[in-house]
Image (spheres, helix red, strand yellow):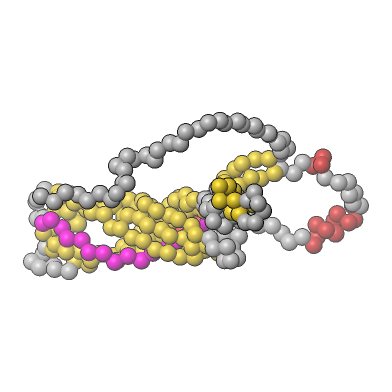
Amino acid sequence: MSKKYSFPGHSKKKHCPKSKVKSVSCGADSYNVSGGTYVPVILAYVNLETDISSHVKLPSPAKEIKSIKKNVSLKQCEVLKHPGSRGKAKIFVKGTIHKNIQYVESCNGYLRDYSVDVPFSCIDEVYIPGADREVKSQKSSLTHEYKYSSKNKLGADPRKSGSYTHEYFNEPIECVLKSADIMEIDLFKDYKHGRFTNLTERMEVNLWFMLVQNQERFAFRYEDAPECPLLEDEIEEIEEQLPERKPSKTILDLIQERLDLMDR
């Protein structure tokens, strides 16, 4: 019986050993920021469409499909923003459509129940200009390494070295799924004698979600603004030149418009 090979010096412990700490000292300073807030900011509303073709085999022949209940859930929604993308970002989406199919085998038979998961994944590019700039980290001592002179000043001291490392924890861009709709057509491939077992599904899936990022915002106080009085004629002239502002629509408004179109 062969034994499992272990590398020399390999430890089966889950955690790394701890070093012996000789001394620790701490000091902290706080800075007062007036009007500063830390809030989630909506960067973009996204409508992502994916087309899916799948095959489902029922456990027994069906005479008629009574109902199909569907639930969409995302397993992954990651946003990748390249430093030179100029406001564009890649979205990696991976999810599942859970289906509960209810059918009958004959005219007076029992109602059968069968559940199946339909996985899907897609990648697309969107425009998100309001995201914070990402800052790089340097965790290796190979780049910022400090050497010190030896006692005879003829080279580096082999017994002493220094380094500078830093980590910056960027705020991630997160997805908030608000709605999903599915347009589907089912094809019964082996329809014989009024019954079938295999279904080929064609689906158009629309995902509606928000891209959100926590950001630091600073409120502007009116009393801090410099005095710059304007005459009434100047104010009226400026207001006439300003374009009429239309109220922005939320993602719920966009979803409701789509539902209203489907009901017509």
Residue 143: horizontal and vertical position, in percent? 57, 57
Residue lying at 83% horizontally and 58% vertically, measured from the top left: 238
Q: Nearer the viewer, residue 209 or 90?
A: 90
Q: Is residue 59 magenta?
A: yes
Residue 144 as seen in the image, left or right of residue 67: right
Is residue 81 at all visible to an observer of this figure? yes
- Kindly identify the residue that appears in the image at 32 percent across and 54 percent down: 96
Q: Position of residue 209 (x, y in %)?
A: 47, 54
User: At which x and y percent is residue 131?
Assistant: 59, 55
Q: Is residue 194 magenta?
A: no
Q: Is residue 61 left or right of residue 257?
A: left
Report the number of discs.
0
Picture quadrant of residue 84: bottom right
Residue positioned most to the front: 152
Query: Which secondary structure type mostly characterizes the magenta part of the structure?
Result: strand
On the image, the x and y values in percent for residue 14 come to 34, 40
Name the residue at 28% across, 50% down: 7
Q: Is residue 68 visible?
A: no
Left or right: 133 as drawn, with respect to 113: right
Along the viewing direction, whichever of 207 and 3 lies nearer the viewer: 3
Q: Which part of the image, by quadrant, shows the C terminus?
A: bottom left
Magenta segment boundaries in residue numbering: 45-60
In the foreground, 126 or 147: 147
Direction from residue 192 to residue 199 in the image, left or right: right
Q: Tell me the quarter of the picture where residue 156 sits.
A: bottom right
